[in-house]
Amino acid sequence: MKVIKPFLLIASLTLLVSCQNKSDKQFEKLEKMNWLIGQWENTTPEGYLTETWSKTNDSTFLGQTYFIINKKDTVHNESIVLTQVNDDLIYRPTVKGQNNDEPVDFKLTSEVENVFSFENPKHDYPQKIVYKKVNDKSLIATITGKQQGKTSTESYPMQKK
């Protein structure tokens, strides 16, 4: 009986450690974007852009984007869910007044040297959303796609507040 107890203890500890290691890597793709957490902003002659990201849980970040003109008129309001589902990292924006106020999924298609590309070729515009971490305090968000038959690209440099 004395032999069984140490064996059960070792087996239980081994199982606990192996399960813990698995869950640590379960959301590895999302963890690579931890640098996004916080408030980002840019002021241009056209207006003020702010994007705020928070971590909801191990698998999900929430983002909120506003573009304000004349220091009072919000002309763009977007809620974003960035979530890892199994091996897929999904960027899911919901834009007021677009797509019947329903979210649209963009799947991570490329991640190279702090450049994260999300795509949905079936969406009207944009079809591609890219976040590039320039450094710890700077990023560039870029949207690309076809609008009225022409390729269009818009870039939004932002600084961390």
Image (cartoon, rainbow, N blue to C red):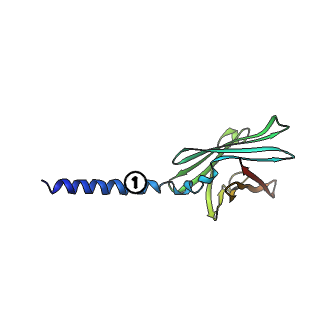
- Residue 94 location in percent, x, y? 67, 42
* Residue 76 screen position, x and y as percent: 76, 41
The answer to whether residue 36 is left or right of residue 29 is right
Q: Position of residue 18 (x, y in %)?
A: 36, 57
- Residue extending farthest to the top is 72
* 41 in relation to 118, above or below: above
For the residue pair 136 and 32, the one nearer the viewer reads as 136
Please identify the residue farthest to the left as the structure is shown. 1
Task: Please report the residue visible at 65 percent of the width from the left and 40 percent of the height from the top.
Answer: 102
Q: What kind of element bears circle 1?
A: helix
Q: How many marks?
A: 1
* Residue 111 in view, yes or no: yes
**Which of the 4 image quadrants contains residue 128?**
bottom right
Question: What type is the residue that disc 1 sits on?
Answer: Gln
Can you name the residue that lies furthest to the bottom here?
112
For residue 118, side relative to residue 18 (left or right) = right
Residue 34 position in % (x across, y down): 59, 52
Quadrant of res 78? top right
Residue at label 1?
Answer: 20
Q: Residues within 10 Å of mark 1 (few under 14, many from 20)?
A: few
Residue at position x 74%, y 38% from top?
Answer: 97
User: In the visual, does 1 lie left or right of 133?
Assistant: left
From where the camera sits, is residue 124 visible? no
